[in-house]
Each structure stands twice: as C-alpha cells, then as structure tokens.
Amino acid sequence: MPVITNIEDLRVLAEKRVPRVFYDYADSGSWTEQTYRENTTDFEKIRLRQRVAVNMEGRSTKTTMVGQEVAMPVALAPVGLLGMQHADGEILAAKAAEKFGVPFCLSTMSICSIEDVAQNTRAPFWFQLYVMRDRAFARSLIDRAKAAGCSALVLTLDLQMIGQRHKDIKNGLGAPPKLTVRNIVNIGTKWRWCMGMAGTHRRTFRNIVGHAEGVDNMGTLHDWTAGQFDQSLSWDDIGWIRDHWGGKFILKGILDVEDAKLAVKHGADAIIVSNHGGRQLDGALSPITLLPQIAKAVGKKTEVWMDSGIRSGQDVLKALALGAKGTMVGRAMAYGVGAMGQEGVEKALEVLFKELDTTMGLCGRRDVHDLNRENLIFPQDIPEPFGPAS
C-alpha cells in the first residue's frame, strides 16, 4: 500500500493507474495552460503569518454551506467523466464525501447517473447542470435531481462553448473516445483500471443516454452532444431555471465583480469564483487573485465560494482568509478516485483536513470562522532578504 501524505502523491499514483486519455482529460487546461498553471502558483505567492503561545485546544473546522452542516468548508466539485478515472467513480466519491461529512456535487456529464448515485448513498448530494439547447431535456434533468432528493442545484455558466484543450484533441477524446492504436496499447497496460471497468455496466454518460430524445447508444450520443452546449444561454434564462428548481441555487463560473452582482440579483444562494480549473478561457486570472474583490462586493449578500487550483488544506485556509465561505475541489478528488477509488477520495479529504487544521493552529486560530487577511502575508509585504542592499 503506497504511503499518501499529500495530494501530489495521489496525482502521481493516478497518473500510473489511469489510461492516458482519461488522466489527461482531468489534469490539463486549455490552449497554453497558462491559467491552469497560475491557478496553483498564485496560491504559492501568498505566505502565512505564524503566531505562537496561543491556546490551540478545541480547534474546529466545522461550518455550513448553503445551510448544510459540513465537517470542513470543502465540497467535492462536479467533474465530468469521473467514472472513467475509476469504475463507478461518482458513486465512490459520493460515498467518501458522505462518510467524511462534506458535500458531493454530481456533474451533468457524469458516467454514473443521478439515480445511480442516489441508490448507492444516503446523504443528499448536489447536482450540477449544463443547460443544453434541448431545454426540455434540461428541465427533465432538474426534475430528476429533485426526485433523487438533491439538496442544491449548481448551474455552470462558463461552458457555453468548450475551450480548446490540446491534449484531448491529440488523445482523440470524444463521446465515445477514439480507439486509436495508441489508446488501445495504453489502456492495455492499466490492468487495475481494466478489471474495474469490466466489473461495471456504467461506461457511458448515463444522465443522457436513454433520457435525451433519440439518444440510446454511444453513436447517437456523439451526434447529439456535438451541438448541444447552448451558446445562447444568458442572464434572461436564470430565472426559469431557478424557479423550476425551487431549492438552494448556486451559480458557478464567476470571475468578475459585475457578474457577481448579477448573480445576486438573480437569486443565487451562493456563487463559486471559478475559471473551470483553467480549462476554458486561457489567459484569465486565477480565482484566488479575484476572490478578495468579489467577496468584498457581494459577500454580505450571498455566500462566496472558490474553486480552481486548490491542492492543499493551506490553499483552503488562504481562500477562507480572503473572504470565501467555502471551497470546492475537483482535481484533488479526481486524483483520489483514479489512484485508489473511494479510499483515495477519503485519503484526499483526510489530507486536506489535516493540513487545514494544523495550519490554522500554527497561524493562531481555533475556528475557521476567525480566519482573515491578518493570517496572510502578501508579496509586497515580504521583507527584502537580509535587509536593504548597502
């Protein structure tokens, strides 16, 4: 059994065990991947202020996210094709989240369906919606999420068109993936993955196949998905989606103060400051850079969360100190699923919790609600090494 001490350990193990076409899908960005890289490197520029001789007994990471009690302010983000990182990946991640006491959000583009996850878990989960041109299908997805007892709807706003991801194109990723010689050879070397996939019947987009009109197999799925992401989606559509859902309503993909204000105007119970993990607009700024101004603008009117780039509990702490009330992690979960299935996601959550709890204590805080900018040191405040030059 490999020793896992951080999220990077899970990433390395996932890269060994997951077929290249699916690993690259989860661990890549668009175009030059500048934004994908800066999502993490911008966290590294922010340092932590150490405090000592403070009573650190009785620390607590507990809080709420849209009224739901959580063990720590971390939710598992919606990740497409999670069930291709490991057989039944969405079910396994949802089970891990339930066991740990944090929310799990299922993607529209999941391999396991809404009903699959509901039948295999007890805790309510969230559902993430992509609005398709087939609005009747979008409404049916919302109805299915309600019937499954989902406790929140997350509407993603930044995928009306798909940013070009060079690795996916070169790997032949599609619906279904192209069975190139390179892919077949690589998949043949991943015996753990192959054994898992042989033991499940969940190998397609089960939220779509058998539910969207005229889509009953992988061939018809390809034709249907080719033109379904709705480029006409606008703020005018938010109202009917919110009203049709009728429950907790979260808007994901906010990177601008004006958009954050519009999200509040349209009834968002929470917004997620996110650039889709650097997979959409390459050249956009990182969420951790934009979080403070967005939190300042709307943080008293709605819950402001952040995702994209979080790889540690220290990153979670930095986001909270800059105004976030919660965070979401996608790749950390995907690495865990790919590396070790449910056990890997549980390990990822344990790592994040331990890093958050320990760092909070060393920064002189006993409660996540007490974190603020005083716990951080920014680049402009770092002293010149060894004093001024003579």
Image (cartoon, helix red, strand yellow):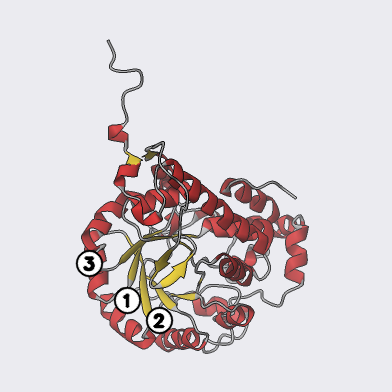
What label sits on residue 261 in the rendered view? Answer: 3
Q: Identify the element where label 1 is drawn.
A: loop
Figure check: 174 above or below 283:
below
* Callout 2–callout 1 Cβ contact below 8 Å: yes
Distance between the alpha carbons at the discs numbered 3 and 2: 26 Å
Q: Quadrant of the C terminus?
A: top left
Q: Residue 255 or 298: which is nearer the viewer?
A: 298
The kind of residue on which mark 3 rests is Lys
Q: Position of residue 74 (x, y in %)?
A: 47, 61
Pointer 1 residue: 232
Q: Nearer the viewer, mark 3 or mark 1?
A: 3
Q: Earlier in the sequence, mark 2 or mark 1?
A: 2
Judged left or right of residue 314, residue 215 is right
Pointer 2 residue: 133
What label sits on residue 90 in the rendered view? Answer: none
The kind of residue on which mark 1 rests is Ser
Q: Earlier in the sequence, mark 3 or mark 2?
A: 2
Figure check: 59 above or below 212:
above
Quarter-of-image position of residue 306: bottom left
The kind of residue on which mark 2 rests is Arg
Q: Position of residue 256 (x, y in %)?
A: 26, 59
* Residue at point 47%, 60% (across, down): 72
Distance between the alpha carbons at the discs numbered 2 and 1: 8 Å
Judged left or right of residue 261, residue 289 is right
Q: Position of residue 268 (x, y in %)?
A: 30, 73
Q: Earlier in the sequence, mark 3 or mark 1?
A: 1
Q: Identify the element where label 2 is drawn.
A: loop
* Residue at point 63%, 68% (across, down): 92
Q: Is residue 127 visible?
A: yes
Q: Position of residue 246 (x, y in %)?
A: 36, 86
